[in-house]
Image: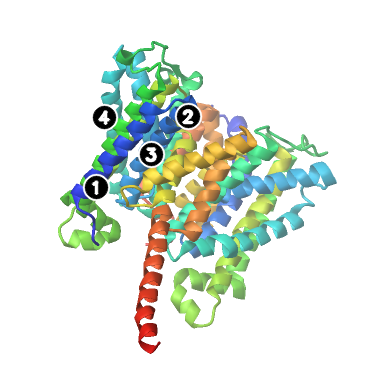
């Protein structure tokens, strides 16, 4: 394992942020800005999934649990608490992190792993969906509408650039969290637990606490995505909040890009959103078409490129390098004989 | 509330629903027992089978009970092909990959159905759809009674296959010790595919028994799949007797829960039971695996 130095990661993150900011600042078309915003929002969800699934090895099929909790916290803090959305945002992130800790404490305490863990996340998201359909403070089936009050002070930007900047800031936060995982002691524990839990325990790592930390962090990022959704669309209902769509998008983007890497989720989310836009321009908006593509891409990636696009790129580069080395090795011998 | 005249029909109704649940869960538990992996596409496969029965009735006028042989055959073939063609190839020897691929399959199937059939709910008409028969103080719909009997017969057949045939012996051998089974000459990939095929064939049968008294839409599998997961977990992963008893039990619990607490809370009750069993007793009530 020759992980690049933290300096290199930070430099890459700075370059990425500058590049996206430059594109957003100079973009003239609303379509491009909208694409950037939604792709960054996808990145955020994929990063969240990658922290738990990629670095922690815990595959969640119900990340909507954290997304919905963040979204409802963001909406309810404004509607019932009369809070400014800027203050509601950290609150929503904390609420989602707490949901992660609570759920993690329950399931990791009892040693749920693999398909059991995936099943329980799925079931928990479904329970939350049904509960939010039937209690009054989530607006039940009608959902919650955040009133339109455009202005930067209200976290409702008239210009899409504002939302792009916010999403970029959150994604950079996610990238920094991932960088921390890659180079910190905690991150090393987490990857040790992922690779072999018994061995990790034997050398003194506490798997329960480590996984708990990961799911809390992952929940916080996913909650930020939920809060972001509410600010952009000003509406949330049980189907959007706890339905399977966000769980699937987070998971597929992370796996398509490459699990357990810094740039995999970013690449995966970008690729998925490009693909989704492409099909939209080809077939128009048909119900379910996006999900068909996500599912198909998931199957194809797992079948043919289990390390994701990033891993695929690496394999191609290695193949290339080997061919070049072979060619270089062949060259002088030919010269000698000729 | 505790009157026999109300309780008895509710329990009977629950048993008839529970038998179909058991059939769905048996397919799931067979696949789990052999491949040690949860088939997340199980609900989507049931949905496809229901559409198949609907299609045969609507366009060929085939009675759903007569559709049983072709549906079982088609679902078996589909399961065999899916396992050999996609699931096995995608696994790369890692369980997580099978998990992801079956999830991907369920997403694709469910949303393809949404694209083709829209989200409309469809039913079929048969001469016996509304027929009822009196058992003591209870009036039971004839299709439900047929479903109960049919599900029990199908379950017995499945048990016989697993316990009494050479294929069943091979399936049990692979489930217990894959390497050992391979060493004594069992074609493990073939047994995997057979198990997947039989698991989906159960769904073909379940669909034929269900549809006369039920409906189909693209999301119909989701409800069943979580119930089936609950039953499998409750009965102990990979335990056939557990799945059968668990199915009947859940059917009765749902029926009584609906009677006392209303429909949607009854559903939450199943989820909570599911989560509780997974957290507190993941080996299941019957504890097939240590």
Q: Quadrant of the N terminus of chain A?
A: bottom left
Residue at 41% from the left image edge and 22% from the top image edge:
A160
Which of the two residues, B240 or A24, is positioned nearer the viewer here?
A24
Which of the two residues, A31 or B84, is positioned nearer the viewer here?
A31
**Circles 1, 3 touching at the beta carbon (< 8 Å):** no
Q: Which residue is mark 3?
A: A43
Using the image, name the chain to which the residue with label 3 belongs.
A
Q: Which residue is mark 4?
A: A94
Neighbourhood count class around disc 3 (C-alpha, 10 Å): few under 14, some 14–19, many 20 upward: many
Residue at 49% from the left image edge and 60% from the top image edge:
A304
Residue at 66% from the left image edge and 47% from the top image edge:
B48
Q: Earlier in the sequence, mark 4 or mark 3?
A: 3
Q: CA distance from mark 1 to mark 3?
A: 17 Å
Q: Can you say whether A31 is above or below A15 in the image?
A: above
Q: CA distance from mark 1 to mark 4?
A: 26 Å
Q: Earlier in the sequence, mark 1 or mark 4?
A: 1
Q: Nearer the viewer, mark 2 or mark 3?
A: 3
Does B168 sit left or right of A174 as displayed?
right
Farthest residue to the bottom: give it: A337
Q: In what element is the residue under mark 2?
A: helix
Q: Give how far across and how far down residue A80 sits, in percent.
A: 34, 13
Using the image, name the chain to which the residue with label 2 belongs.
A
Q: CA distance from mark 4 to mark 3?
A: 20 Å
Q: Are marks 2 and 4 on the same chain?
A: yes
| Marking on residue A240 | 2
Q: Earlier in the sequence, mark 2 or mark 4?
A: 4
Q: Is residue A151 visible?
A: yes
**Circles 2, 4 touching at the beta carbon (< 8 Å):** no
Q: In what element is the residue under mark 1?
A: helix
Q: Which residue is mark 1?
A: A9
Neighbourhood count class around disc 4 (C-alpha, 10 Å): few under 14, some 14–19, many 20 upward: many
């Amino acid at each position: 394992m020759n992980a690049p130095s933290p300096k290199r990661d930070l430099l890459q993150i700075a370059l990425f942020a500058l590049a996206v900011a430059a594109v957003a600042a100079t973009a003239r078309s609303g379509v491009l800005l909208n694409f950037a915003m939604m792709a960054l929002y996808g990145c955020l969800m994929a990063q969240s999934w990658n922290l738990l699934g990629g670095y922690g090895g815990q595959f969640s099929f119900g990340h909507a649990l954290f997304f919905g909790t963040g979204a409802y916290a963001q909406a309810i803090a404004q509607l019932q608490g009369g809070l400014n959305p800027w203050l509601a945002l950290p609150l929503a992130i904390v609420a989602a992190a707490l949901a992660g800790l609570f759920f993690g404490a329950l399931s990791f305490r009892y040693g749920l792993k693999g398909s059991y863990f995936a099943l329980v996340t799925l079931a928990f998201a479904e329970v939350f969906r049904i509960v939010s359909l039937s209690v009054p403070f989530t607006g039940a089936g009608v959902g919650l509408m955040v009133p339109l009050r455009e202005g930067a002070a209200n976290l409702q930007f008239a210009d899409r650039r504002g939302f792009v900047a916010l999403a970029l800031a959150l994604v950079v936060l996610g990238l920094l969290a991932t960088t921390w995982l890659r180079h910190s002691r905690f991150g090393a524990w987490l990857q040790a637990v992922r690779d072999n839990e018994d061995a990790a325990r034997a050398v003194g790592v506490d798997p329960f606490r480590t996984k708990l930390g990961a799911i809390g962090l992952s929940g916080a990022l996913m909650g930020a995505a939920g809060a972001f959704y509410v600010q952009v669309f000003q509406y949330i209902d049980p189907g959007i909040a706890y339905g399977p769509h966000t769980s699937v998008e987070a998971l597929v983007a992370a796996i398509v890009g490459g699990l357990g890497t810094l740039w995999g989720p970013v690449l995966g989310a970008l690729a998925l959103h490009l693909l989704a836009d492409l099909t939209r321009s080809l077939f128009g908006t048909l119900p379910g078409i996006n999900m068909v593509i996500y599912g198909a891409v998931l199957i194809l990636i797992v079948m043919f490129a289990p390390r994701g696009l990033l891993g695929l790129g690496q394999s191609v580069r290695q193949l290339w390098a080997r061919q070049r080395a072979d060619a270089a090795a062949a060259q002088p011998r030919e010269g000698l004989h000729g | 509330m505790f009157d026999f005249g109300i309780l008895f029909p509710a329990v009977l109704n629950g048993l008839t629903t529970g038998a179909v649940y058991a059939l769905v869960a048996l397919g799931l538990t067979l696949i789990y027992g052999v491949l040690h992996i949860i088939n997340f596409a199980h609900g989507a496969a049931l949905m496809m089978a229901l559409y198949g029965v609907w299609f045969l009735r609507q366009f060929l006028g085939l009675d759903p009970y007569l559709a049983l042989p072709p549906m079982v055959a088609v679902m078996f073939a589909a399961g065999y092909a899916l396992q050999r063609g996609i699931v096995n190839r995608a696994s790369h020897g890692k369980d997580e990959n099978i998990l992801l691929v079956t999830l991907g399959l369920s997403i694709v199937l469910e949303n393809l159905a949404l694209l083709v059939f829209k989200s409309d709910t469809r039913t079929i008409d048969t001469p016996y759809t509304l027929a009822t028969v009196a058992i003591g103080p209870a009036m039971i719909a004839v299709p439900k009674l047929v479903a109960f009997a049919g599900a029990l017969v199908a379950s017995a057949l499945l048990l016989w296959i697993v316990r009494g045939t050479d294929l069943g012996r091979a399936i049990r051998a692979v489930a217990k010790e894959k390497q050992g089974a391979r060493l004594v000459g069992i074609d493990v990939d073939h047994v995997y595919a057979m198990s997947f095929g039989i698991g989906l064939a159960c769904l073909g049968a379940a669909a034929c028994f269900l549809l006369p008294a039920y409906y189909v839409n693209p999301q119909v599998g989701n409800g069943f799949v979580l119930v089936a997961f609950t039953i499998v977990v409750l009965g102990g992963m990979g335990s056939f007797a557990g799945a059968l008893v668990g199915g009947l039990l859940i059917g009765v619990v749902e029926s009584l829960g609906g009677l006392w607490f209303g429909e949607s809370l009854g559903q939450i009750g199943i989820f909570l039971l599911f989560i509780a069993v997974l957290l507190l007793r993941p080996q299941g009530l019957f504890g097939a695996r240590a």
